[in-house]
Amino acid sequence: MSKIGLIIEREYLSRVKKKTFLILTILTPVLLAALIAVPLLLSFIKGSDIKEIAVSDNSGMYISRLKSNDQYHYIPATESFETYKQKAKEDQGVYAYLVINGNLSTDTAKVSLYSRKQIEMELKDFVSNQLKDLAREDKIESYNIPGLKKIIDESNPKISLNTIKWDDEGNEKESSSELAMAIGMVCTMIIYIFIFAYGAMVMSGVIEEKSNRIVEVIVSSVKPFDLMMGKIIGIAMVGLTQVLLWVVLIGGILGIAGIVAKDSVTPEKMEKFSTEIVSTQSNQPTGMGTVQPADVQALSSAQKEAEPTIRKIYQMVSNINLGEICFWFILYFLGGYLLYASLFAAVGSAIDNQEDATQFTMPLTMIVLFALYAGIYSASNPDGPLALWCSMIPFTSPIVMMVRLPFGVPLWQLLVSFGLLVITFLLTTKIASKIYRTGILMYGKKPSYKELWKWLKFKN
């Protein structure tokens, strides 16, 4: 085996065999899912305390029409505003004080909501949306036109727009812009994270070997260029292995979840559940918190309507060319990593410790951040000038091209973009190898950009 092959093997096995690698690889999908699901679930959990809102309705038009919920309760204001303010100082009394001074259908500036604490958006929206609906109803009734409300409601139909694309043979397939955008953004974020994470790993490895003086022993039998490339390729294989394991794990989790959901939620079970609910509630009085047969019937109907929607989503996923996306994802993943890893390796060889890295990594960080934001802004217009040019520029193309791929990119653009990426990688590798060759044995001196330029012009 060649020397560079031995270095690749050492870098790969030394990291893959670590327990931390296996643990993080297995736990990361679970942690990411928890990171998304837990805050979402917690956001639906409401506080047990009921917040009372005293209403002073000088118009007398709204106090009886305001509807409370489980968290906010409207009560008529029985005391003066000053009394409520004094009680609030002693942590007593109501949570908020609502003042309605007139007819809201003619003057929307006649409402004020007072509270000792900063009013949360949820409460503000809860109050303003109700008052807006009531003011709208009064405004419609003021025209004295029979059936006007029904006419207005019917004049605002809901339209569901189906997006369909056709291929070169004229075959039509239903697509989803939202799904394509989601896939593109996920691929973009993965490449962005791995460029930083594994590029920094290359730099840290070089700095560690240099500070421990191990590199002096290594370069006595291996060329600096072989050492750099072996380290870069070995760590690239570690990253690729981790991504493939994540794909398998996430695919398995989604597959199991789909089977469980399909088996546990069926029309027969839903109908049985509805019957049990109705029979349980039949002897209870009708009121708040009671499940009515109509509600259960609506729930069952919604579940039945959801089944074709789920099948529709699966169909749209199958209509996206996931094979092509995965193929180009791997190429751009490796191309982007190799491009930046060679530069990170050069930075690591030029310095003696992590504290000095910021000076040289900042330009690289700014370029990658620009690529990320360009990808985010290009998601809504994947064929616009920003997306097109940034998907061609080698330093931004690995990230931005992933946003465009799910929407379809001409083959010539992919070939030109990836070709430029490969050429740029070869050029940066040549430049990085010159810095690496000189800097790997330099100690005790913090180099400047002027010093690095001298290393680049140095000839053997």
Image: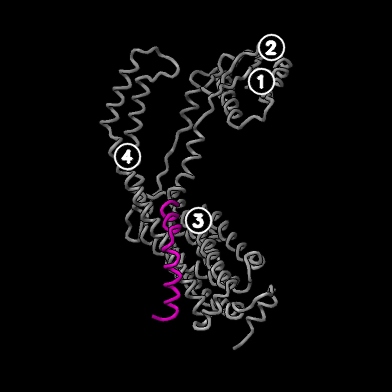
At mark 4, the secondary structure is: helix
Q: Quadrant of the N terminus?
A: bottom left
Residue located 36% across and 26% down the image: 298
Asked whether disc 4 touches disc 3, contact meaning CB atoms under 8 Å apart, the reply is no
Residue located 50% across and 27% down the image: 152
Asked whether disc 3 touches disc 1, contact meaning CB atoms under 8 Å apart, the reply is no
Asked whether disc 4 touches disc 1, contact meaning CB atoms under 8 Å apart, the reply is no
Amino acid bearing label 3? Met
Asked whether disc 2 touches disc 1, contact meaning CB atoms under 8 Å apart, the reply is no
At mark 3, the secondary structure is: helix
CA separation in Å, label 3 and label 1? 46 Å
> Which sits earlier in the primary sequence, circle 4 or circle 3?
3
Magenta stretch prevailing secondary structure:
helix
Residue 113 shows up from this direction: yes
Question: Does the segment drawn in magenta span residue 190?
Answer: no
- Characterize the local packing of mark 4: few (<14), some (14-19) or many (20 or more) Cα atoms within 10 angstroms: few
Query: In the drawing, does residue 37 fall left or right of residue 299?
Result: right
> Which sits earlier in the primary sequence, circle 4 or circle 1?
1
Amino acid bearing label 4? Ala
